[in-house]
Amino acid sequence: MNILKLIGRDKEIFVNDISTKEQELSKIVSGSTFLVIGGAGSIGQAVTKEIFKRNPLKLHVVDISENNMVELVRDLRSSFGYIDGDFQTFALDIGSIEYDAFIESDGKYDYVLNLSALKHVRSEKDPFTLMRMIDVNVFNTEKTVKQAIEKGSKKYFCVSTDKAANPVNMMGASKRIMEMYLMNLSQKITISTARFANVAFSDGSLLHGFNQRIQKRQPIVAPNDIKRYFVTPKESGELCLMSCIFGENRDVFFPKLNQDLHLITFADIAVKYLAELGYQPYLCASEEEARQMMETLPKQKKWPCLFTSSDTTGEKDFEEFFTDKELLDMNRFENFGIIKNEGDFLTDKIDLFTNTISEFKKSKRWNKEQLVDLFFKMIPDFGHKETGKYLDSKM
């Protein structure tokens, strides 16, 4: 299936920038060592491929998902074969003592790339999953940066999200807080990051869910009022690697907006997706109707769809990669924009966040309201609104 066509494009957006830098990029990668954390997720796999195909001296990949790691290796072997350097994968939890032992056993990497994250807006529905999101997005990041500093790495890259710009949900806000921690640690190691659009058909995404619904012969549901920017998995890997290799300290890379990268609704993509499979969408008025129509419509090359407006907590009406308070460099690359950060270290806020979360954990008692209140202290203009409805309550 042509992903570019489904997201309304006919060409990749970073081709010229990659081509211009390819000789230098390949030279640096082939002479360097890499650790990719969270390397078996959709973005992690894309980044790993971009590094692997340029023959690095050492490439170690860590991820908590054993199954996804197996698929990553199969994919690399099937696409590229083998490299001369040291390539290994490790099924480890970054927060575990086993991971710490792994780092102590060697830990010598020129570049450390952290792609691990809890990325779903739905993860804020309860205080326990929300606390894990804070752990993964903020404190695991802080931990792995400090380990990179101790082991003498030259560069640390961490993926952020467009939802960190003027955040309206806890996931985006957790990534904004993560950026605060990164700015503070950038005094000791060169750090760059990236904000970018939704990765089309990434694991767990709504578009990936379209595949699952077709395989399981279930209705397709999508919001018709939420517009998003989309990049392909390959483009996500290119963006991250370019930021990692060429980003200066505190740089945040993002895709420039142009005629090729434009907002599109999930419902519009669903229509294109079904057309690719030879189906016409049949618009239903309710979940129950959509489920019932599955028994007859596919035989007529029609597929039950429920396209509705969004009313769940944490959904942003539109996406943006930067705020009006951030300094931009729009001239260095053709299709990569860069946010330039001078270094606002916010040590007092970071200490407050660390200490408050530590107290919650010690007591083993906290609620969502306490966490939301803490987030507002960190981000005074946080646009969070509680509707009382979450994605898990919908089909």
Image (cartoon, rainbow, N blue to C red):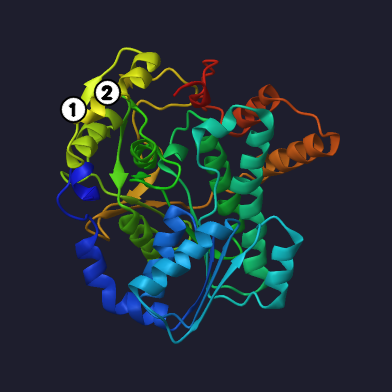
Q: Position of residue 238 (x, y in %)?
A: 34, 61
Where residue 347 appears, x then y in whole percent?
66, 46
The residue at the far top in this view is 285
State the residue in front, 215 or 192: 215
In terms of image quadrants, where is residue 229? top left
The front one of 307 and 21 is 307
Q: Which residue is mark 2?
A: 296
Residue at 24% x, 49% y is: 3
- The local crowd at label 1, few if under 14, some if 14 to 19, many if 20 or more residues have their Cα within 10 Å, is few
Q: Is residue 224 visible?
A: no
Which of the labelled discs sits on residue 300, or is there none? 1
Density class for disc 2 (Cα within 10 Å; few <14, some 14-19, many ≥20) is few
Q: State the residue at coordinates (18%, 27%).
A: 300
Image marks 2 and 1: residues in contact by CB distance under 8 Å: yes
Q: What's the residue at 22%, 36% (across, down)?
A: 274
Left or right of 11: which side holds 97? right
